[in-house]
Image (cartoon, grey):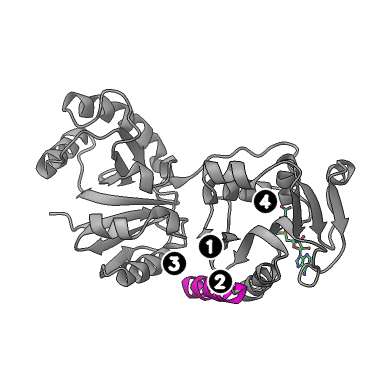
Amino acid sequence: MTDSALFCLCRAGFEPELAAELSERAALAGHHGYARTQRNSGYVEFIVEDAAAASQALPWSNLIFARQKLVRLADLRGLDPSDRIAPILGALDALGAPEAFGELWVEHPDSDDGKPLAGLARSFGNALRPALRKAGWLSKLDDPRRPRLHVVFLAGDHAVLAQADPDDSAPWPLGIPRLKMHPDAPSRSALKLEEALLTLLDPDERARRVRDNMQAADLGAAPGGWTWVLMRNGMKVTSVDNGPLRQALLDSGRVDHLRADGFSWQPKRTLDWMVCDMVESPARVAERMATWFRENWCRQAIFNLKLPMKKRWDETRVCLEAFEYQTHRPMIVRARQLYHDREEITVFAAPR
Ligand SMILES: C[S@@+](CC[C@H](N)C(=O)[O-])C[C@H]1O[C@@H](n2cnc3c(N)ncnc32)[C@H](O)[C@@H]1O
C-alpha cells in the first residue's frame, strides 16, 4: 500500500528548500510529516498521515519552492513496458475514487533524469486517455473544474499516480508556464517579470494593478528587460542603474535613465510600481524594499531576492519576515521561485 503523501515538483537542486518549506509549514498547520527526496531529482514527496488535509492546509499559491502540488494516489514501481495501463486502472479501481477526473496530465520531473521521459509521457498520455474514458475514470470531454489526474514518470518502469485540485495547483503541465522570449526584449530577464506578473497576480489584480500611464521605478535596470516589460504595459519608467540601457528604451520617450545607486535613490512622489533586480545580499534588498513601503514611495513592488548557496530556506524565511516587519504595516506578500528564476525567488508586495 502506498503511503499517504503530497507529491511536489520543484526546480532541480532546490529539493532541500522545498522539503524544509513543506515540513515547516505543514507542522505549523498541525500536520506533522517528513519529506523524502533526492538531490537534483526535481521533486519532493511529503509523507503525512492525511495528505488531502495537509494539501488543503498548504495552498499551492502560498508555496515558494513548489512548482506543482499533487496528492499522491499510488506509487507504481516495476511497471511492465508492454502494459503500463492495466496497473494504473487497477490502482484506480483499488482506490475507488468517487467520480471521474476532469483531465489527464502525463508528466515527468524537470531534471536530468526526468527530461528524457518527455517522449514516453506524451505517447503514453495518448494511449492512456481513451482507456481511462472507457473505464469511466475520465470525463468524456475535458472538464477543468473537476479534480485532475496526474501520472508522473520517474523512470520507464516507475510512475506516480496523483491528483490535483484545479483551483489549488499550477495550471501548467510540469508547473512550468511556457513564455516566449520577444525578439525586442533587451534581456532574458524580461521573462522573469512577465512570469511574475502572470503568476503572482490573478487576472482581476492584473487588470486593476497594471495599467496605462502608471509611474514606475526599476532599480538595477540594465540592460532593460524589466523596464521593457513595464513600458510595454503602458507605464512610464525611471530606470536606475550605472550600467547602460538599450537605446530603443531611451528612444521610446517613456524611460528616464538615472545613473544612480538603487540603494539610496528615492522618488519625489509616490509611484504606482517599484521593481528591483539588483544583485545584492537578500537581507540588504529586503531591508531597502521595506523602506520603500514604510516611506510610502510606492504602492506595489516586485523584487528578486538572490539566495545564498547554503541555508536557502532559512534565508528566505528570515528575509521575508524581516521585510514584512520593517514595513510597519499589514502587507500582502507573495513569493515564488519562478521557472525563469535561477538561484533566487521573486516577491510581489503591496499594502493590504
Ligand atoms: C540582474 S541585472 C538586472 C537585469 C534587468 N532586470 C533586466 O531585465 O535587464 C542586475 C543589475 O543591477 C545593477 N545594480 C547592482 N547594484 C546596484 C546598485 N546599488 N544600484 C543600481 N544598480 C545596481 C547592476 O548594474 C546590473 O545591471
Q: In the figure, is residue 233 to the left or right of 40?
A: right
Residues at badges 2 and 3 in contact (C-beta under 8 Å)? no
* Quadrant of res 107: top left
Q: Would you name the residue on which mark 2 appears?
A: 324
Q: Would you name the residue on which mark 3 appears?
A: 17
Label whose residue precedes the other's in the sequence (2 or 1): 2
Residues at badges 4 and 1 in contact (C-beta under 8 Å)? no
Which class describes the residues within 10 Å of circle 4: few (<14), some (14-19), or many (20+)? some
Report, in whole angstroms, how far the alpha carbon at label 3 lies from the one at label 1: 19 Å
Q: Position of residue 110 (x, y in %)?
A: 44, 49
Find out if the beta carbon at label 4 lies less than 8 Å from the nearest ligand 1 atom: yes
Q: Would you name the residue on which mark 1 appears?
A: 333
Q: Position of residue 163 (x, y in %)?
A: 28, 45
- Residue numbers of the magenta segment: 308-327
SS at badge 1: strand
Q: Is residue 133 magenta?
A: no
Residues at badges 2 and 1 in contact (C-beta under 8 Å)? yes
Q: Would you name the residue on which mark 4 appears?
A: 189
When the figure is inspected, residue 227 is found, relative to residue 136, above or below; the finding is below
Which quarter holds ligand 1? Answer: bottom right
Q: Amino acid at mark 4?
A: Ser
Q: Residue at x 36, y 71 (%)?
A: 24
Find out if the beta carbon at label 1 lies less than 8 Å from the nearest ligand 1 atom: no
Quadrant of the rendering where the C terminus is positioned = bottom right
